[in-house]
Image: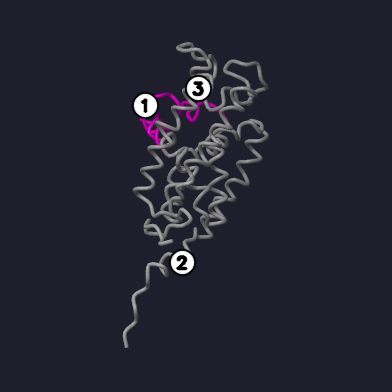
Amino acid sequence: MTTAAPTVAATASSPRRVPWPVAAVYTAFLAVLVPVYWVSYGPTNFLYFCDLALFLALISVWTNRALPASAAAVGILVPQAVWVADFFVTLAGGRLLGMTDYMFADTSPFLRGLSFFHFWLPFLLAYLVWKLGYDRRGLAVWTVLAWAALLIAYFLLPGPGAAVEKGTPVNVNYVFGASETEPQTLVPPLVWFGGLLVGLPLLVFVPTHFALRALCADATPGSDVSGRRRPA
């Protein structure tokens, strides 16, 4: 008597879950980071793209839904890869962009240790979309979230050089330029801001979206895990 090979449908219905130790350790980390960051930097700190990605990943590790992790991966895989490269160059005594200089500043080692999540978060997100699949709706979800965060940062939060309480973030998501002390002067402020609104989706989010579609199984509702569309 022979046993039939599992069908594509059976394979598609097989659960893909994040191991519970990964979820537990990640949750424990956020249980420390969130209150410490809230006290040290204030609630507006959580409007940074990387912090939004932390919460999206948390949803995915407990619900095993691909959409939150997919959205976060679309938004920050490329920027955080640049962060990792900048960190290694700075660690070696060189200088790339200077975006990780604060990691080597003479400040609280505990806060710097928490900030090291910028290093491992892109690897976690890559693991999640590999494990759970990539949901193509992530591009739209992240773009809406990013636009909302940018609009709030530009119109409601302090710009570079603003007189604020120590630790309060300024120039969140670089809506006024690349510096925290002075706004950029290359173009009018609204031109820079409009460039972020348009340029980030075109140059970062969309290319990442297509790369993830090509490299990961399709977790979009209506598709099986192999990426082929199910028949209607």
Residue that badge 1 annotates:
93
Determine whether the residue tagged by mark 2 lies in a helix, strand or loop: helix
Q: Quadrant of residue 164?
A: top right
Q: Is residue 157 left or right of residue 127?
A: right
Q: Which quarter of the rendering shows the N terminus?
A: bottom left
Q: Residue 207: x percent and y percent? A: 38, 37
Q: Amino acid at mark 1?
A: Gly
Of the two numbered discs 1 and 3 in the rendering, the one whose residue sits closer to the viewer: 3
Q: Residue 131: x percent and y percent? A: 43, 56
Using the image, determine if residue 69 lies above or below residue 196: below
Q: Which mark is residue 226?
A: none
Residue that badge 3 annotates:
194
Magenta span includes 178 = no
Ranked by sequence position, the earlier of labels 3 and 2 is: 2
Using the image, determine if residue 18 lies above or below residue 110: below
Q: Residues within 10 Å of mark 3 (few under 14, many from 20)?
A: few
Ranked by sequence position, the earlier of labels 1 and 3 is: 1
Q: Residues within 10 Å of mark 2 (few under 14, many from 20)?
A: few
Write the residue at 48% across / 25% down.
Answer: 196
Query: What is the C-alpha distance between the residues marked 1 and 2?
Result: 50 Å
Q: Residue 72: x percent and y percent? A: 50, 42
Q: Residues within 10 Å of mark 1 (few under 14, many from 20)?
A: few
Q: Quadrant of residue 227?
A: bottom left
Write the residue at 59% across / 27% down.
Answer: 151
Span highlighted in magenta in the image: 81-107
> Nearest the camera: 178 or 86?
178
Q: Amino acid at mark 3?
A: Gly
Determine whether the residue tagged by mark 3 lies in a helix, strand or loop: helix
Residue that badge 2 annotates:
13
Colour scheme of this structure image?
A: one colour
Write the residue at 51% across / 36% down.
Answer: 143
